[in-house]
Image (cartoon, helix red, strand yellow):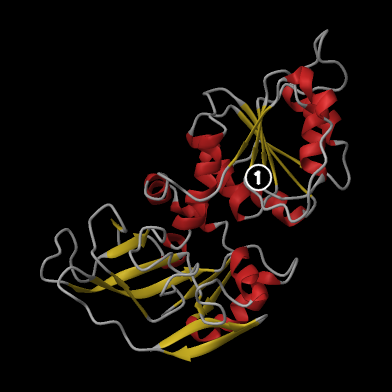
Amino acid sequence: MKSVHVTGPNTNEWVEVERPVTGPRDVLLKMKACGICGSDAMYSHVGGIPPRQGATPLGHEPAAEVAEVGADVTGFAVGDHVVIDTMAFTDGLLGSGGAQGGLSEYVLVKDAEPGRQLRVIPSDIPWEVAALNEPMAVAYHAVNRTDPKPGDKVVVFGAGPIGLGAVLGYRRRGASHIVVVDIIPSRLEKALEIGADAVINSAEEDVAARLVELHGDGATMLVRGTRSGTDIFLDAAGAPVIPQTVGNVAKSGAVLGVVAVHKKPVELDFGSILTTELTIVFAMGYPTEIFEVTDDIIENWEKYKLIISDVLPFDRSLEALELAKTPGAADKVVVRFD
């Protein structure tokens, strides 16, 4: 069968591999869609992930149809539509250094257990939307890490897929007002479509002043200056200026969550932040959220579909990888297998 692998630094290629054989405790999946993640470009750039350096199967945002069910497996039937916990495979992380990748015609789930690696979803959910389950779990974990309370005022920096997924997650958790900050007008328009209450173009507007206007004045006798009434800030963009901006504008007791990958060290003025008692938390992966977010996708799949910018067929997977890593070319690229 066909599979896409990293075969060397900055090199992705089609590779012919054996179709997996289904054992009595296994489930064979026919892949139907797979999203392209920013980390795919990182894996390609470094030439793979040890111990499979130079031979890393790609694809860790999958959705699939059950093709075969082992004799000892219960809870699944041929034809079921499923979303997948790529971190629960017994042969390594799917598409992130494990033995298999989602950009393959078939994937084998060894030692399959209901609720562990797979969850059945309704068949009316479009495959490309189902493939958002994994990145949306990342976004929802970031939301959970900031521990939002009903009525909180939230600012999300970055209107990419994770930032937009966080908007939906904060709404689910009861946020009263959500602002999205970005520099690309089309992304800000999409944020409003998805459900943000307001947007700020940080290339054109004074972020601190606008946040005070939108979320109220959070300054006190102890914490002075231009301070917004924002309860939670989420960095889903990874620009060094974002934590610095939050440090300068956060009110006492605010929370900053960081889910974005920062490629360079960030300098923060702890002296000025000290009086705010700003809580800083980090989020990576999805310890519990992979199937928690599925319910919201099922209920609101039309909104999640807005996150997708490009859908390419499986035979154009290499093109999809290039498109996704080109700055400004696409927001969320998904490969479909039919």
Q: Is residue 62 left or right of residue 234?
A: left
Q: Is residue 155 above or below residue 19?
A: above
Q: Position of residue 231 (x, y in %)?
A: 65, 25
Q: Is residue 333 left or right of residue 95?
A: right
- Give 138 or 173, whichever is nearer the viewer: 138
- Residue drawn at x 78%, y 42% as measured from the top left: 242
- Give 199 or 74, whichever is nearer the viewer: 74
Q: Tell me the SS state at disc 1.
A: helix
Q: Position of residue 332 (x, y in %)?
A: 60, 64
- Residue drawn at x 44%, y 48% as measured from the top left: 300
Q: Is residue 210 above or below residue 182?
A: above
Residue behind mark 1: 192
- Give 310 or 114, whichever is nearer the viewer: 114
The quadrant where residue 333 appears: bottom right
Q: Amino acid type of disc 1?
A: Leu
Q: Quadrant of the N terminus?
A: bottom left
- Residue drawn at x 59%, y 24% as measured from the top left: 152
Q: Is residue 299 above or below residue 4?
A: above
Q: Position of residue 24 (x, y in %)?
A: 14, 72
The quadrant where residue 232 appears: top right
